[in-house]
Image (cartoon, rainbow, N blue to C red):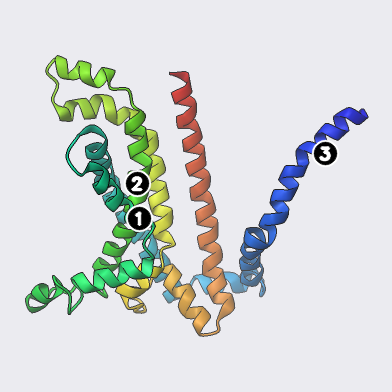
């Protein structure tokens, strides 16, 4: 290897080295510490924390809520993106901003707002209470919070795809008598498959790790409304660091897998678009 080639290789590695140096205390070391503390007592002890009744319930409950949230927001987010992208009406831009607000609003505020609407003293809660319906501090309340918090992720994934989608084929379909639903099913939907999968995975991942709004509307009730992040929080409060980090390590691994899939499918979608 001559000096020029060596110099180019070293100079090419410098930006990556600087990035790692900056990210080491901010991201890499905190993530590593989760696994270090989780495995501090060895693999048998790590596994023993994961098979307790509380952990199994929290993980199962989190996965179910995340699946349902992703399914509902896939439908709602796709419909909202289609309306905002393909129709014109007064206040469209303002509505788009409002629908994206949950990303900017602190999640604790989201939980408070849901309590003030659906809680025992809330606007709807006072009506539903006498009927024996109380969505807060139940699985339904947790689901409402997760739908609210993660809705913009699906909307933000699908709307740019629809905005960039050429309307030539869609307009041609209308000229030969196709309905709006037929045009969506046979022309628009095939182009959205990559975006739908990416948005669903992103929504699932964020729902799986949601904490701020959940802690407000769930009551953090053991074996009833306690999600995995809430279990981690309660174990930290109780001083059971290894148990908390064992569950945190599982969530970190699942999140890594999910975001790897998101990047993979996003890359495949980009390659397909470039080939068109």
Q: Label 1, label 3: how many angstroms apart (C-alpha)?
A: 42 Å
Secondary-structure class at tag 1: helix
Q: Position of residue 60 (x, y in %)?
A: 39, 64
Secondary-structure class at tag 3: helix
**Front one among 101 and 107:** 101
Q: Earlier in the sequence, mark 1 or mark 3?
A: 3
Q: Label 2, label 3: how many angstroms apart (C-alpha)?
A: 41 Å
Q: In this rendering, which labeled residue sits more in front, label 2 or label 3?
A: 3
Q: Position of residue 75 (x, y in %)?
A: 25, 45
User: What residue does disc 3 label?
Assistant: 10
> What is the number of the mark on residue 229?
none
User: What residue does disc 2 label?
Assistant: 154
> Residue lying farthest right?
2
In the shown orientation, is residue 131 left or right of residue 113? left
> What is the number of the mark on residue 150?
1
In the shown orientation, is residue 51 left or right of residue 69? right
Tell me which corner region of the image, top left, top right, bottom left or bottom right, holds residue 155: top left
Q: In this rendering, which labeled residue sits more in front, label 1 or label 3?
A: 3
Vertical placement of 202 versus 107: above or below? above
Vertical placement of 73 versus 36: above or below? above
Whether tag 1 and tag 2 are in contact, CB under 8 A, the answer is yes
Tell me which corner region of the image, top left, top right, bottom left or bottom right, holds residue 32: bottom right
Q: Quadrant of the N terminus?
A: top right
User: In percent of the image, x 38 and y 63: which residue is there?
Assistant: 62
Tell me which corner region of the image, top left, top right, bottom left or bottom right, holds residue 242: bottom right
Vertical placement of 241 versus 250: above or below? below
Secondary-structure class at tag 2: helix
Q: Quadrant of the C terminus?
A: top left
């Amino acid at each position: 290897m001559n000096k020029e080639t060596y110099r180019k290789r070293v100079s090419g590695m410098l930006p990556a080295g600087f990035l790692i140096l900056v990210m080491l205390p901010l991201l890499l070391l905190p993530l590593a510490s989760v696994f270090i503390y989780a495995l501090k007592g060895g693999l048998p002890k790590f596994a023993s924390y994961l098979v307790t009744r509380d952990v199994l319930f929290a993980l199962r409950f989190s996965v179910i809520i995340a699946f349902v949230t992703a399914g509902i927001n896939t439908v709602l987010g796709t419909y909202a993106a289609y309306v905002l992208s393909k129709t014109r009406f007064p206040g469209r831009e303002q509505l788009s901003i409002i629908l994206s607000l949950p990303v900017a609003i602190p999640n604790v505020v989201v939980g408070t707002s849901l309590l003030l609407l659906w809680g025992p003293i809330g606007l709807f809660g006072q009506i539903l209470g006498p009927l024996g319906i109380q969505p807060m501090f139940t699985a339904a309340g947790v689901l409402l919070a997760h739908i609210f918090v993660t809705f913009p992720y699906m909307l933000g994934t699908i709307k740019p795809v629809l905005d960039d989608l050429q309307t030539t084929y869609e307009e041609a379909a209308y000229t030969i008598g196709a309905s709006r639903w037929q045009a969506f099913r046979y022309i628009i939907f095939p182009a959205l498959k990559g975006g739908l999968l990416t948005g669903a995975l992103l929504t699932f991942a964020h729902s799986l790790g949601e904490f701020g709004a959940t802690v407000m509307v769930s009551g953090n009730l053991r074996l009833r409304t306690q999600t995995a992040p809430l279990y981690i929080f309660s174990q930290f409060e109780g001083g059971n660091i290894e148990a908390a980090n064992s569950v945190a390590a599982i969530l970190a691994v699942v999140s890594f897998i999910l975001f790897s899939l998101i990047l993979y499918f996003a890359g495949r979608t980009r390659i397909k678009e470039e080939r068109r």
